[in-house]
Image: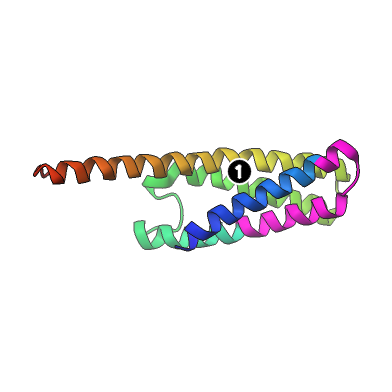
Amino acid sequence: MVQGVLAPLQFAVFLMSLALVMHYLGTGSGLGIATASVVVKTLVLYTIMVTGAIWEREVFGRYLFALAFFWEDVVSMLVLALHTTYLIALFSGAVDAERQMWLALAAYASYVINATQFVLKLRAARQQEHMWSGADALGHTS
């Protein structure tokens, strides 16, 4: 249930932030709001990762890297690393604002790949569930 709320929320925050980052990179204005949006996106990401790990523990007995979600979790670690690197760059001032925004875009690209993995996994599970329920309706058992 929590993941069902957080995933669409994260996607909405992502879309808004992406627009703000692109606006900044295209015009040079709106740095403050673009930066705030990336920080909010990162906080939502951390929240969904923690709650997802708890769910994975409840369902599969492991917080991360359960066989059923191994590759999704591997890419999730990349997503977390890139978002965290953005925060480090922001708060340390190690790179200028434009490079920070490009780093945010790299983090967002990895997020899109990871979100696609989860959507495809969910879709496949629903199709399999539909196939099994159809077989049950016909009186087939396994």
- Residue 84 lies, in percent from the top left, at 69, 52
Quadrant placement of the C terminus: top left
Q: What stretch is highlighted in magenta?
A: 23-45
Q: Relative to 13, is 31 on the left or the right?
A: right
- Residue 71 lies, in percent from the top left, at 46, 41
Q: Is residue 82 magenta?
A: no
Q: How many labels does the image show?
A: 1
Give the residue at x 85% y 48%.
Answer: 94
> 95 above or below 48?
above
> 107 above or below 88?
above
Give the residue at x 27% y 43%.
Answer: 130
Quadrant placement of the N terminus: bottom left
Residue at far left of view: 139
Q: Relative to 39, is 62 on the left or the right?
A: left
Q: Relative to 58, is 14 on the left or the right?
A: right
Q: Relative to 69, is 85 on the left or the right?
A: right
Residue at the spot of label 1: 111
Density class for disc 1 (Cα within 10 Å; few <14, some 14-19, many ≥20) is: many
Q: Disc 1 residue type?
A: Tyr
> Which secondary structure dominates the residues rendered in magenta?
helix
Give the residue at x 54% y 54%.
Answer: 7
